[in-house]
Amino acid sequence: MYTEEKTQNNEAMAIVVDTASASNLAVSEASGLMKPTLKRGSTGQAVKELQQLLFHWGYYFGAIDGIFGIYVENAVKDYQHRVFLAEDGVVGSLTWQALYSGAPVNMPILMNGSSGNAVKIVQNVLKLNGYYFGFVDGFFGPMTKVAVIQFQMGQGLTADGIVGKRTWHALSKLPH
């Protein structure tokens, strides 16, 4: 049994991980979190913690009973969608990090000339919210840069046309 005391928002919280169980431990070097991987069928204190975090972010309103059922799985998928993670309903290292930070994690820095799926995500979110009017093609060109700058200005962010941590976080709060 592994127990760790954490202080968050001036409240002490005991984190207990059963290292003797068959569950895999998700270790996040960046955040120092050591959490079990959870999925439907998981039970225990870590699931209660998950339920409390999902409740905190407004994604779960059921009982805090330590049972990872279909409602918890759907809440996890909805939260994963919000923070641009794979929507698999499995709570691994990246999902734990996102739940604790309230923001997307492990997202690339994007700028003029970038390409790929992450650019498509940015273009799609900006298009859905009236900032981008081009094709969702995965290429970060001049139109995408202008849309990012307009979005950043509207959010009070540094309007540099570069999608970094703060811009990803702001994008995650938009409907998408």
Image: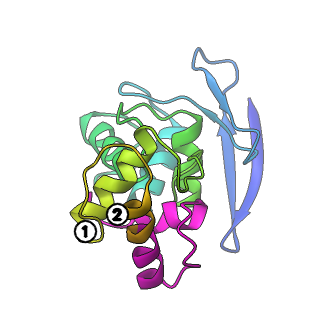
Which of the two marks, 1 or 2, is nearer to us in this view? 1
Residue 134 falls in which quadrant of the image? Answer: bottom left
Query: Is residue 174 within the magenta segment?
Result: yes
> x and y percent of residue 173 in the render?
38, 66
Left or right relative to 22: residue 130: left
Which secondary structure, mark 1? Answer: loop
Residue 129's label in the rendered image is 1
Up the image or down, 66 lies above or below 83; here it is: above
**Which image quarter: residue 16?**
top right
Residue 22 quadrant: top right
Tell me if residue 167 is in the magenta stretch: yes
- Look at the image and give the residue range highlighted in magenta: 148-176
Badge 2 is on which residue?
A: 58
Disc 2 residue type (three-letter): Gly
Q: Is residue 30 left or right of residue 143?
A: right
In the rendering, at what x and y percent does residue 150 appear?
40, 78
| Amino acid type for the residue under numbered disc 1 | Asn
Q: Which residue lies at the image location 35% right of the left edge and 27% below the top edge? A: 40
